[in-house]
Image: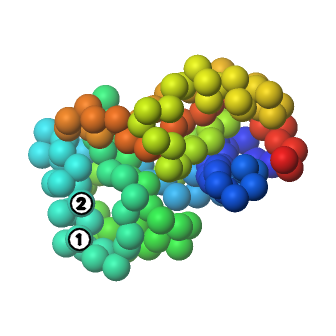
């Protein structure tokens, strides 16, 4: 497995209470844009999405947000869409920023989708531990502007040792 972050979607099957794991590299679906001339212009997700629609309307975006040091992160639906952004976004887009894939990270991450907001993270942590997944961090994602909890949980750990259940 690459040293890049893994994105593993866990889907709970209600009929037989098994987990389905799908391995995908999250780094294969991210574009970073740094050294933006006017980073304040792209501090909202709506403005970032508008800029992408202006130049690459065919690309499907999962998430787009500004980074703490003035850059932008764009999560696309698949690796092909990432290549389209890297190759088709003109130099003048995003304030002539430098477009590149993210740099490597040793932590692995799993995103558990469709988890009801009433589910306690401590219980979920114990559930995963009982299935051989040792986690270093677990947190519920929230909507950026409202802080409202979503049905997505991010689980971080140094490595995944997943067996079928």
- Residue 112 screen position, x and y as percent: 57, 44
Quickly name the residue at label 2. 49
**Secondary structure of the residue carrying numbered label 2:** helix
Of residue 16 and residue 155, the one placed in the foreground of this image is: 16
Label 2 packing within 10 angstroms: few (<14), some (14-19), many (20+): some
Label 1 and label 2: CA atoms lie apart by: 6 Å
Q: Is residue 142 left or right of residue 87?
A: left
Tell me residue 140's x, y (percent): 45, 32
- Viewer can see residue 79: yes
* Residue 95 falls left or right of residue 19: left
| 50 sits to left or right of 150 | left
Q: Which residue is mark 1?
A: 53
Residue at coordinates 44% horizontally, 61% vertically from top-left? 76
Do the residues bearing badges 1 and 2 touch, measured as CB atoms within 8 Å?
yes
* Residue reaching furthest to the bottom: 58
Residue 159, numbered circle? none
Crowdedness near tag 1: few (<14), some (14–19) or many (≥20) residues, C-alpha within 10 Å: some
* In front of the other: 22 or 93: 22
Residue 87 seen by the camera: no
């Amino acid at each position: 497995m690459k040293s890049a972050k893994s994105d593993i979607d866990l889907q709970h099957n209600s009929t037989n209470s098994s987990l389905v794991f799908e391995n995908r590299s999250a780094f294969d679906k991210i574009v970073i844009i740094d050294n933006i001339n006017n980073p304040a212009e792209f501090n909202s997700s709506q403005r970032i999405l508008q800029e992408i629609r202006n130049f690459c309307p065919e690309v499907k975006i999962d998430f787009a947000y500004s980074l703490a040091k003035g850059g932008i992160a764009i999560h696309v639906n698949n690796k092909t869409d990432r290549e389209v952004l890297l190759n088709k976004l003109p130099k003048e887009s995003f304030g002539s920023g430098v477009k590149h894939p993210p740099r490597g990270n040793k932590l692995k991450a799993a995103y558990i989708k469709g988890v009801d907001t009433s589910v306690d993270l401590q219980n979920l942590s114990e559930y995963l531990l009982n299935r051989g997944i040792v986690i270093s961090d677990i947190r519920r994602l929230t909507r950026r502007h409202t802080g409202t909890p979503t049905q997505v949980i991010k689980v971080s750990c140094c490595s995944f040792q997943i067996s079928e259940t």
